[in-house]
Image: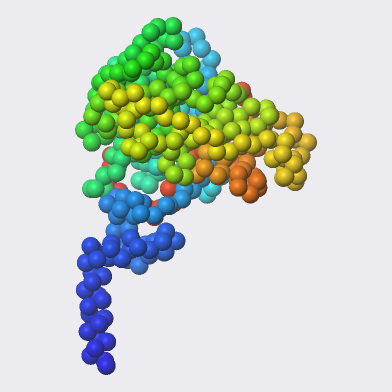
Amino acid sequence: MKSRRMKHEGVLHTALSCDDILCNILIRLPPKSITKFVIVSKRWLHLICSSSFRHSYLSRWRVGFNLLGFFVCNSLYLGRPKGGARRPRSEPALPLLSSSREGDDLKFSGVLKKLGYFIDSSDGLLLCGRHPKTYFVWNPITKQQYKLPHPRVHFEELCMAFIVEDSPDDEICYRVVRAKCESRFEEVYVVTIETFLSKISTWCYSKLRCSSTISLSPWTSGTVIGGVIHWYAAQGNIAIYDPYHHEKHIALVKLPGPFDFDEQVLGESSDGCLQYGWSCKAGLQIWVLEKGFDGYSSLFSTNEQTILSWSLRYKLNFKIMWRKNPTLATKCVTRKETEILAFSPQDSKSVFIRSGSSIYLYHIGSGRMEVIQYQGRGSSILSDFSKVVPYFKRAWPQSTLCCGGNSST
């Protein structure tokens, strides 16, 4: 019996010493278990944190996101024209309303003072800078910043997008897209873009063709779903661009209904579709752009005319919402205008709502609201020109031992 047990333990040890076998075992375990196994050894930590295992695991399991806080973006300063409003020295360029310990560490580390204004985030990485030519990418794991080379082309007005890409060699890979915004009074069928690729550390110039006249909304950041970029465009349209598609084509999709609402947001639904939410004084609606049999791929073919349909998923009356949450419906709250703020990542049933300086997470299925507590309450988001953007990082084990990438410059 003893020799049989020793033989069994030997076989088990040999199996667990093989990375491929160990990966095959770990990939079958739920997310709550994975986070516990990183303390077994440095080898297990490195294996679980590696990009290759992370990519394989996330293709099989849905892993949630952690909310670190909210960045406040003031449109008066971003892309400020000559003679435009100057930011007072007392007002930080990159204010963070922290809602977590990790957010607190970032806020008080001093690094935000070096990055300029907030532009976008992707998988926890921050894209910041000052238009039109100074940009930084900051890595929250390595605590390092990378200054991008100056773009080659000057755009008077532009919008941007930021995509973190999977990399098999554990290097942090990403692309930054700058798109020129033309005047709405000109009939333009082309969008000029410049893309920075971290793998080759250079900007690449290209032109995207559109089957109809197009004008992108300036000083906005695109919503990225599965590597596909979605920008707001003029006349109530969404411009959709797939940087990985062989055809350099950008498609326009009409937003559902009127498009002059007080607030509107884009996000990813639970089933991987583009979702669009708008709010007015009375309430909000959430719509989803249904996919075709090939997803959204047919939109980028110049030989096909594809019409995709929107479906209304949720409709909410703010008065009913407050009535169901009487403890939150104080006089202070009801005097303030309620508006949609952002979607929770890859979630169709939770939405962030702002009322004055208060931020809530509303759960559509149950009708329940929860208050989001944050540092610096109310002091930085009273301006009508302020856009509040949640900052998320995927709830995945991370270690500096597993991270390659660029060092600060």
Q: Quadrant of residue 260?
A: top right
The furthest residue to the top: 185
For the N terminus, which image quadrant?
bottom left
For the C terminus, which image quadrant?
top left
Residue at (54, 47) in percent of width and height: 100
When the figure is inspected, residue 385 is found, relative to residue 245, above or below; the finding is above
Residue 145 visible in the displayed image: no
Q: Quadrant of residue 312?
A: top right
Residue at (29, 20) in percent of width and height: 208
When the figure is inspected, residue 318 is found, relative to residue 27, above or below; the finding is above
**Chosen colour scheme:** rainbow
Name the residue nearer the viewer: 304 or 187. 304
Name the residue nearer the viewer: 263 or 349. 349
Q: Is residue 352 left or right of residue 326?
A: left
Residue 313 visible in the displayed image: yes
When the figure is inspected, residue 338 is found, relative to residue 167, above or below; the finding is above
Q: Position of residue 13 (x, y in %)?
A: 25, 75
Q: Position of residue 369 (x, y in %)?
A: 65, 45
Q: Is residue 292 left or right of residue 364?
A: left
Q: Is residue 361 left or right of residue 152?
A: right
Residue at (67, 27) in percent of width and height: 281
Q: Position of residue 6 (x, y in %)?
A: 24, 86
When the figure is inspected, residue 149 is found, relative to residue 311, above or below; the finding is above
Name the residue nearer the viewer: 16 or 258. 258
Residue at (48, 16) in percent of width and height: 235
